[in-house]
């Protein structure tokens, strides 16, 4: 490959067609046809080897992970290349959930490194269905809603959990075991997760049947956790058995993010996405430990080791305006791998003079031939007549010209 220069490069991202995906939302946003109605769950914009973008270099394309491997300092810059072993440290996604995703937790960095090494030593293939660790990285992530987005995040305050366990007759034995602290919550949750399928069914079946009866006379709404218990049961229970992940729906905070709001999910926070469309930014990993609402592998022991059994209230993030650049706002988290920024042109077109101090990926939320963002670099310019991601190499001075009413999302490494 010829010498690469720091510049603006269009990216060809790719789709993940998971069963829970929405067949309409992402194709509509990307101006794509989907005549077969295939579920379109995640649009991956990054360099993860499971589904890397292709970078457009003149007349040919190169997988982004390969491009970075050959030119790490040009794309990443010296500081990011040193800190993250010559790899792009984040993965950017457009996500659309039509059905609930699995109850899950992301491991810590140490657990991911140890688990990945152990499974490699045991000879577990990377694509094995029972494998827990697909790579050696942790996966803190940020979800920002593009429309009302429903999810579960972290355990509810202990008092609320106690009230729920006491109010559901079938959960009374768990209420007796729960003393309102992390240790007893762990004991309750682990006890339920290790129960035999027949016992799980005996506990959950009368609960679900009672909720179905109540729903007929007084329908639940999406603001009720009972709605999501029934919705999840319809998606994942079958064969005369109820999915054990339903128990977690009673224990976790129910969140509804309004457009522009976000939630951050560090390691250890048990969670699930339920429905909606959003921009997701995370560390460059595909590690997930599941706890139900899925036909996939559930390793209870590994799950319990990684879950933080802390009762907490809902924390919703709002974008903070940048004091130096009008129209730019930032979602601040503790992640060292990524930061999500949003550029808006409200009240009229706006121009942003920017410098990339790390690798960046830009993505417009809406674009068309009449109103398209323009990105002008030191050597070339790019008009985004189609919503597509763009790679900005480190160390580049560039300008974003944003038509009125449009939004551009910017994923960076917070140097």
Image (cartoon, rainbow, N blue to C red):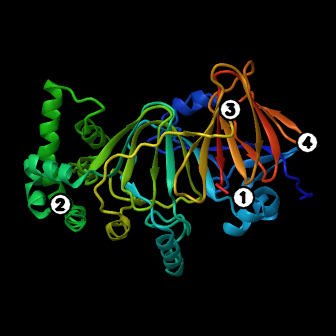
Residue 232 lies, in percent from the top left, at 30, 42
Comparing marks 2 and 1, which lies closer to the viewer? Answer: 2
Indicate the secondary structure of the residue bearing disc 2. Answer: loop
Q: Visible in this render: residue 239?
A: yes
| Residue found 88% across the figure and 53% down from its top | 5
Residue under label 1: 65
Which quadrant: the C terminus?
bottom right
Q: Earlier in the sequence, mark 2 or mark 1?
A: 1
Which of the pair 133/307 is nearer the observer?
Answer: 307
The single residue placed furthest to the front in the displayed view is: 323
Q: Which residue is mark 3?
A: 387
Asked if disc 3 and disc 2 are in contact, CB closer than 8 Å, the reply is: no
Q: Give the alpha-carbon distance from disc 1 to disc 4, as whole Å.
A: 23 Å
Residue sitting nearer the eye, 237 or 165 = 165
Q: Is residue 224 left or right of residue 19?
A: left
Q: Nearer the viewer, mark 3 or mark 2?
A: 2
Select label 2 or label 4 by which is in front: 2
- The image shows residue 92 at horizontal and vertical percentages of 60, 48
Q: Earlier in the sequence, mark 3 or mark 4?
A: 4
Residue located beneath label 2 in the image: 180
């Amino acid at each position: 490959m010829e010498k690469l220069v720091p510049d603006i490069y269009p990216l060809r991202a790719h789709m993940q067609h998971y069963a829970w995906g929405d067949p309409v939302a992402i194709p509509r946003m990307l101006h794509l046809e989907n005549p077969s109605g295939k579920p379109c769950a995640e649009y991956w914009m990054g360099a993860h080897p499971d589904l890397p973008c292709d970078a457009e270099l003149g007349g040919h394309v190169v997988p982004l992970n390969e491009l970075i491997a050959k030119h790490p300092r040009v794309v990443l810059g010296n500081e990011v290349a040193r800190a993250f072993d010559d790899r792009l440290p984040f993965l950017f996604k457009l996500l659309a959930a039509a059905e609930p995703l699995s109850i899950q937790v992301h491991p810590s960095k140490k657990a991911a490194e140890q688990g990945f090494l152990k499974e490699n030593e045991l000879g577990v293939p990377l694509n094995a269905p029972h494998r827990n660790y697909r790579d050696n990285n942790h996966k803190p992530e940020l979800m920002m809603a593009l429309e009302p987005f429903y999810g579960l995040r972290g355990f509810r305050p202990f008092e609320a959990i106690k009230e729920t366990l006491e109010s559901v007759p079938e959960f009374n034995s768990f209420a007796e075991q729960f003393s309102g602290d992390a240790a007893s919550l762990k004991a309750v949750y682990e006890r339920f997760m290790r129960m035999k399928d027949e016992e799980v069914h005996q506990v959950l079946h009368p609960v679900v049947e009672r909720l179905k009866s109540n729903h007929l006379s007084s329908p639940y709404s999406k603001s009720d956790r009972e709605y999501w218990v029934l919705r999840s049961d319809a998606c994942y229970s079958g064969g005369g058995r109820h999915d054990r992940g339903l128990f977690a729906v009673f224990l976790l905070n129910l969140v509804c993010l309004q457009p522009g709001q976000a939630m951050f999910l560090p390691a250890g926070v048990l969670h699930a996405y339920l429905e909606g469309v959003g921009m997701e930014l995370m560390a460059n990993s595909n590690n997930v430990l599941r706890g139900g609402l899925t036909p996939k592998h559930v390793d209870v022991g590994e799950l319990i080791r990684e879950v933080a059994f802390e009762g907490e209230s809902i924390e919703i993030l709002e974008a903070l305006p940048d004091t130096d650049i009008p129209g730019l706002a930032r979602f601040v988290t503790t992640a060292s791998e990524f930061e999500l920024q949003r550029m808006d042109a409200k009240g009229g077109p706006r121009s942003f003079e920017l410098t990339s101090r790390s690798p960046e990926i830009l993505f417009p939320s809406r674009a068309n031939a009449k109103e398209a963002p323009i990105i002008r670099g030191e050597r070339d310019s790019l008009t985004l007549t189609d919503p597509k991601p763009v790679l900005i190499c480190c160390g580049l001075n560039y300008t974003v010209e944003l038509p009125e009413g449009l939004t551009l999302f910017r994923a960076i490494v917070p140097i």
